[in-house]
Every structure is written in C-alpha cells, then in structure tokens.
Image: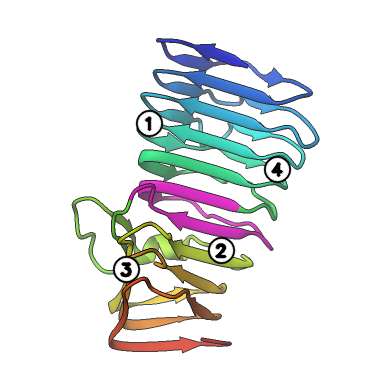
Amino acid sequence: ALATRAGALALRGNVTGSGHIALQAKATVVVGGDVTVRTEGASTITVTSTADSVLMAPASAALRTGSGEIRITAAKDARPGALVSSGLATVTAKGTALIQGDLKRAGGNTDIVANDVDIRAKVASTGGVLRIAPLQSVPMVVGGKDPGGAGVHLSTKELALLQDGFKQIVIGSSLTGQVVEFRGTDAALVFRDPLVVNASGKGGSVRVAGTLSGDSLTLLNAGAATTLDGAKITMQRNV
C-alpha cells in the first residue's frame, strides 16, 4: 500500500507488484501519462482519494491486473484511464465520473457509479456488463436536454459512444426513490445491446416518453410506478 495522510499523491513512474496494490491520499491522486500500475493474477488494484479527485491521464495511464478487481473511488471527481482486467472494474465518484479515454475492458464487467457521468470516449467490453448508476438517490435522465440540478444525464451523443457487444447495459439502481426517465421525444434513444432498467427500490419509478429502441428491454419491478407517456418501444427481441 502507498498512502499519504494529508497531501496529494502523484505517480510519475510505473508501479509493479505481485500482490494487492492500494494507492490512497486525502487530496488528489494523479496517475500521470504513460504510467502503468501493474500486478498479476487475482490481485486487486484500488486507487482512492478520501477528500478529493482521482485523475488518470486518459490516453496513456493504465491499471493492469489479471482477473482481480480494479476500484477507483473519489470523494469528488474520477477520471479513469485504461482499466485492464478480466475482473470487475468500478469507478465511484461523489462528483463526476469523466470517461475521456479507452477503458480497454476487453470483456470485463464495468460499474460507473457517480452523481454525474460525462462520457466523451467510446466505451466497449464485448461480453461484459456495463452498469451506470447514481451514487446517491438522484434522478437518472436518458436523452433530451440536461435538466440541470442534481442528477445523472446521458445524452444521445453519449449513448452513441456505448459500443455494440455488451452482454447487458444496466441503467439505474435499487436505491430508495430512484427515478429513471427516458426522453425520446426529440430524438430516438437507441441501445444496441440488451437494456435493463432498475428502479426497484422503495418509491422508485420509471418513465418512458417518445421512442426507445434496441436489442431487448427488461424493466425490473419499479418500486412505485412505471409510466409510458406517448412511448414507442421497439425491440428486436424481448420486452
């Protein structure tokens, strides 16, 4: 483990181990350009900022292990680089999870859990599950204009960056009061992989307006209600 109690942690050179690797700081953790943190087998890699952000150089920084989990946790924002493992990779942020470079998941499951998500690069993992969920019980809105305020908004441009080949794409959570809205009135919302919508916690709700299309759709039991408002849902397989 490598930790600082009060200051920032900046990695400018490679870190290599044969067991679990944990990097932690109270302030910002920076993994610089062309820096690789590497271990092997089922060993895990965790990178944590307890009071600030975790920022990896999106084009060239990498966390690499065999089948072990990779976990990035930030009290503010998280910007991952490559997360190379056949195991689960989780990016958790109380602020924004910024996807700005190739995550290089190659079949591993990926969880993005944050109170705001900003996707600016292609996200792919053939055969893996992609889960996008809020950290706290804030609304999730897919499509339409950004409603502003607290909540996770995924634009149609961001949806287009989710590449074909995921086993499932899961939107939402089982948090109490979870609201998930699909706003396909101005522009159709297209998911190329099986879509699972989760608002199954107490008081949760799902609303679909306009056009939603894709491979297949599974609505987990909404805690309170599911509303179809002028919805046109077209799936190649099951609904």
Q: Classify mark 3: helix, strand or loop.
A: loop
Query: What label does residue 137 carry, if any?
Result: none
Q: How far across and how far down the image is residue 177, in percent?
A: 30, 61
Q: Residue at x 29, y 54 (%)?
A: 138
Q: How is the image coloured?
A: rainbow
Q: Estimate the spatial distance between the alpha carbons at disc 2 and disc 3, rounded to whole Å.
A: 17 Å
- Picture quarter with the N terminus: top right
The amino acid sitting under disc 2 is Gln
Q: Residue at x 41, y 10 (%)?
A: 7
The amino acid sitting under disc 3 is Gly
Extreme residue in the front direction: 202
**Residue topped by disc 1:** 75
Q: Could you tell which of marks 2 and 3 lies nearer the N-terminus?
A: 3
Q: Is residue 87 shown left or right of residue 238?
A: right
**Residue topped by disc 2:** 163
Q: Is residue 81 magenta?
A: no
From the viewer's side, name the closer residue of 51 and 191. Answer: 51
Tell me: residue 186, above or below residue 123: below
Q: Is residue 113 magenta?
A: yes
Q: Residues within 10 Å of mark 4 (few under 14, many from 20)?
A: many
